[in-house]
Structures are given as C-alpha cells and as structure tokens.
Amino acid sequence: MKKVEDYVRSIPDFPEPGIIFRDVTTILQDADGLQLAVDGIIDLLKDVEYDIVVGPESRGFIFGVPVAYAMHKGFVPVRKKGKLPCETISMEYDLEYGSAVVEMHRDSIKPGQKVVIVDDLIATGGTIEAIIKMIEQLGGQVVKVCFVMELAGLKGREKLAGYDVASLITYEGK
C-alpha cells in the first residue's frame, strides 16, 4: 500500500538551484493520495478534543475543509488582506523578502473554543504563527497544528514552540 509521501512530486532546482520543491498537487489529483492525506490528518487528531478547524488560504482550505466535514466541525478560513467581507482582525508576518498580512473574521472564533489549524506545509512557520496570534486574540485556544508536509531545514517548528505540531511527512532539507 502506498503512503502519502509516495504521491508527492519532487522538483529539483525550483524555484532556485539547490532547492527541491515538494509539489502537493500530485497528492490532490489522485483520489487515493487525497484520501490518505485527509485520513492521515484526521488520525493525527484522534485523541484531540476540539471545536473548530482553521485553515489558511488556499491549501489550508483544501485539507482543512474535508477534515472539518468528516469530524462534523465548523471551518474558519484565514485569507489574505481585503478578501473577507465582514469585520476582521489582521496580523502581519515576515516573508523571505518583505511581509504579508492575513485576516479572519472578528466573530469566527468564540472565547474558549478549542482550535485545530490545518495546512499543507510548514516552512518558516510565519503564517501559522500569525494565525495563532489572531486566534488567541479572539480568546481561542490552539490545541493542535497539523500539516501534510514539513520542511524541517527551515525550522518553522521553532516558531511554534509550545504548541502541539504534527506533520504527516517530514523532509530534512529546505
């Protein structure tokens, strides 16, 4: 039986020489790969008590929504600045060159809610760190953060120290 990592396409020297790009689209386009990834995340959550799933645009939606659906939980989208129609809170975070801003609706997390964050990849951890700050600002408690893939060489897990972080696949490099 194949594992989730068997569905990941690795592209050498993209976007620059020496980098191996881990392509999640090959997981998505295969029914078995997608099912393994979603079921794997659900399995990471089997002993976790939580109320709601949060996922960042856009691949966090792809993996977070089926998890929320299967577990009969709500889903909260985190979007790029200016994409949500109601009152929002926002958080700026650093990118390799510059910064970005993510937002979520101010009423999306209720005080005391236990929150799981789902995304496709952890690299430097900046996006998830910003999301955690927003969830906590709204009174939520992050009980687990789940990823399909982790690029351990970029040390994103260090930014999330103190949180329960799990990945289905870990690649040692960048």
Image: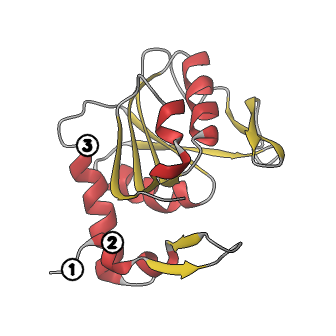
Query: Which residue occupies the foreground of this view, 132 or 87?
Result: 132
Taking 124 as reference, is 1 above or below it?
below
Badge 3, how many Cα within 10 Å: few under 14, some, many 20+? some
Taking 88 as reference, is 97 above or below it?
below
Taking 117 as reference, is 112 above or below it?
above
Badge 1, how many Cα within 10 Å: few under 14, some, many 20+? few
**Label 2 element class:** helix
Can you say which quadrant of the picture contains the C terminus? bottom right
Which residue matches tag 2? 5
Q: Which mark is residue 45?
A: 3
CB under 8 Å between discs 2 and 3: no
Q: Is residue 31 left or right of residue 153?
A: left
**Label 3 element class:** loop
Q: Earlier in the sequence, mark 2 or mark 3?
A: 2
Q: CA distance from mark 2 to mark 1?
A: 8 Å
- Residue sitting farthest toward the left: 1
Instruction: Please state the horizontal and vertical placement of residue 34, each as a whole percent of the image.
Output: 36, 73
- Residue drawn at x 56%, y 50% as measured from the top left: 123
CB under 8 Å between discs 3 and 1: no
Which quadrant would residue 169 be assigned to in this image?
A: bottom left
- Residue drawn at x 42%, y 76% as measured from the top left: 8
Which residue matches tag 1? 2
Amino acid under label 2?
Answer: Glu
Amino acid under label 3?
Answer: Leu
Query: Which residue occupies the foreground of this view, 172 or 169?
Result: 172
Amino acid under label 1?
Answer: Lys
